[in-house]
Structures are given as C-alpha cells and as structure tokens.
Image (cartoon, rainbow, N blue to C red):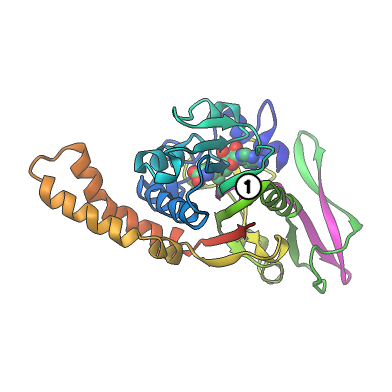
C-alpha cells in the first residue's frame, strides 16, 4: 500500500491521483466550500475556548491540492487573523497547488502547536498490515512479487492489534501507522483539538465481514480492482478501526458534527442571499444557492454524513 500510493516514481499520489471532480473520488471539501465554512466556525470555537490566543495554528494534514484550505481561508475565521494555516501534504505535486496564504509542509511540524490539527480522509490512506485467520491463529499476510505481478504470501503467526479470537478465513487490518500518526499529532498539540473525519469500523467488525467491505480501491470515480492489481494506478483505502487508535476521542457522525457547528445557519444565510441576489445571478448568488445541495450531500447518513468525526482535545 505504501509503495502503491506513495512510491517516489510511480505511486498513485505521486503521479496523478487525487480527490476532486477532475480526480478520482469526491471528498467532503470537494463537494464545495460549505464544509470548510463549517470547519472555520469550529476552529473559531476552539480558539474562543482557548481564550483567543494570537498565533493560533491550523495544521491540516493530508491537505491534497488545498481545496479545504481555500474554503477555510475564504470563510475568514477570526482565529486566523493573527494565526497561521499549515497545509501538510506528502505529495510534492499536490503541494505545488496549495493556495497563497497557507504554508505547505511535507510532514507535521515539530510543535508545540496551540490550535487545531485537522485530517479529512487521511487515516484511511495510511498503509496497514493484514492478518488472516488460519488454524485458529492469526497469520500475517505479506505481499511479494511474482512474474511481474504482486501476490499474497501468508507468513508467520502474529498477535492481533487488539484482543480478538482468530476465526478461520477471517481477515483484519492492523493500522499501526494510523495509530502512530494520531499519537504524533497529539504529541505536538500543546492546547487545542485534533479532528479527523473518516469512515470507521472496529477490528471485530472487520473480522466478521468480507475484506471487500472494508478495503476498497478507486480510480477515475469508479471502484477499482483487486488492491494488488495495477499498482500505482488506483487509490487503496481502508475503513479505520477506531479501537486501534489512541483512546480519548469523542465520536459522532459527520452529520451531527456539522449540524452542531452551524451548517443549518449557513444554509439559511445562503437561501437569504440567493433570494436577494437571484435577479443579479452573479457568482456569489450561485454559491449561496448551491449551499442547500452541498449540505444535503454532507449530512446524508448513507454517504459523507455517515462518516465519523473523531475529536481528541489536548489541553493545559
Ligand atoms: C484521500 S486524500 C484526502 C485529501 C483531502 N484531505 C480531501 O479530503 O480531499 C489523502 C491525502 O493524504 C496525503 N497523505 C498521505 N499520507 C500523508 C502523510 N503522512 N502526511 C501528509 N499527507 C499525507 C495523500 O498524499 C493524499 O493527498
């Protein structure tokens, strides 16, 4: 997964893969600017709770081409008047598209940070290991090369990431990288919040399902093939097992999170702006009008609204 997505020569994100209409899949920021506008309100609420500090820092990780950063900056949250927006993105190609007003970084800053760390659909894109139940024991599944293709090799017995009885034929992902990434992000956060949005599961739920339900591939807005096929030409993404992440997060659906942080107010303001400007029909009027449609997609519990918002609060 690491090589397929991030290989320096032919990794998916190195060579051309991305979120967005002209990319391979749609994420919440790519639906339109409303997601960023709500997150700007959330950032201001964290800033207020910390006593409105100068130098409040937003660290957006897995920032892609900077779409979310553009929306947040356009919403002009007060916390950024004397603050900074750091956009962390591994892919140099995507980093080069970041807008003015953000500081592009290849990895998390050293810290300490007072502010927020934000990651939309990052954890599902971090490489995981795979275990397979054989003879009442979990075994690691390794990937090797064979006649120009990639093949699975079942290797040595291995402890599961959380206590879980092995079931013959079952598979689970081991998400050490995602867990370590969350720990690292929390370690740089002196005060504030770490917020991650993703499609989530538990390790036991994975074991009870066929792997095709929690391990998916995408390319050009279509479901892709087997993860071992076409290395570097399709996204590989996995549901995030919450029970493998550091404890202490509060969780709610994306729909509830956005509702709690005022998505309805923004939609109502958009409706009003549309009714006042519909006759002019300018870009601002159209943007205001499209908020209703964006909101429907962002809170749809069968789609993006059903994602989980995980928030860890760090504090003095
Ligand atoms: C699924 S995309 C999400 C992009 C964006 N957040 C969005 O919601 O549209 C995941 C992004 O995370 C980046 N990425 C993966 N691992 C990373 C890491 N350790 N640090 C920073 N970016 C990373 C990938 O290159 C990719 O652009």
**Which residue is located at x 11 percent, y 49 percent?**
276
Q: Position of residue 184 (x, y in %)?
A: 71, 48
Q: Position of residue 303 (x, y in %)?
A: 44, 60
**Which residue is located at x 43 percent, y 51 percent?**
44
Tell me: 212 left or right of 271: right
Q: Position of residue 157 (x, y in %)?
A: 91, 60
- Whether residue 122 appears in magenta in the rendering, the answer is yes
Name the one closer to the observer, 122 or 225: 122
Name the one closer to the observer, 13 or 216: 13
**Which residue is located at x 53 percent, y 62 percent?**
308
Tell me: 25 left or right of 217: left
Magenta-drawn stretch, dominant element (helix, strand or loop): strand
- Whether residue 298 appears in magenta in the rendering, the answer is no
Query: Which picture quadrant has residue 231?
Result: top right
Q: Which residue is mark 1?
A: 125
Q: Could one spot residue 209 in this view of the protein?
A: yes
């Amino acid at each position: 997964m690491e090589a397929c997505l991030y290989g320096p020569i032919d990794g998916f994100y190195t060579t051309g893969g991305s979120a967005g209409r002209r990319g391979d899949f749609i994420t919440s920021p790519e639906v339109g600017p409303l997601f960023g506008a709500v997150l700007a309100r959330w950032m201001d609420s964290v800033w207020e709770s910390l006593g409105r500090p100068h130098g409040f820092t937003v660290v957006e990780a897995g920032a892609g081409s900077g779409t979310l950063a553009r929306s947040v900056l356009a919403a002009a949250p007060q916390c950024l008047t004397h603050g900074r927006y750091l956009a962390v993105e591994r892919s140099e190609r995507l980093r080069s598209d970041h807008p003015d007003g953000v500081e592009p970084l290849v990895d998390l800053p050293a810290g300490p940070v007072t502010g927020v760390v934000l990651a939309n659909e990052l954890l599902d894109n971090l490489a995981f290991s795979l275990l397979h139940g054989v003879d009442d024991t979990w075994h690691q599944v390794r990937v090797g090369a064979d006649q120009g293709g990639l093949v699975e090799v079942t290797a040595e017995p291995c402890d599961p990431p959380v206590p879980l009885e092995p079931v013959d034929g079952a598979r689970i992902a081991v998400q050490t990288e995602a867990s370590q990434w969350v720990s690292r992000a929390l370690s740089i956060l002196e005060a504030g919040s770490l917020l991650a949005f993703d499609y989530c599961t538990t390790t036991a739920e994975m074991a009870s399902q066929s792997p095709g339900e929690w391990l998916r591939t995408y390319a050009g807005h279509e479901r892709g093939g087997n993860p071992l096929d076409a290395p570097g030409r399709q996204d590989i993404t996995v549901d995030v097992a919450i029970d493998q992440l550091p404890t202490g997060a509060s969780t709610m659906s994306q729909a509830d999170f956005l509702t709690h942080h005022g998505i309805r107010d923004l939609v109502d303001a958009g409706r009003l702006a549309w009714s006042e400007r519909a006759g002019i029909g300018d870009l601002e009027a159209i943007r205001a009008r499209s908020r209703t449609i964006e909101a429907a997609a962002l809170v749809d519990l069968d789609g993006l609204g059903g994602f989980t918002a995980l928030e860890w609060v760090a504090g003095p």
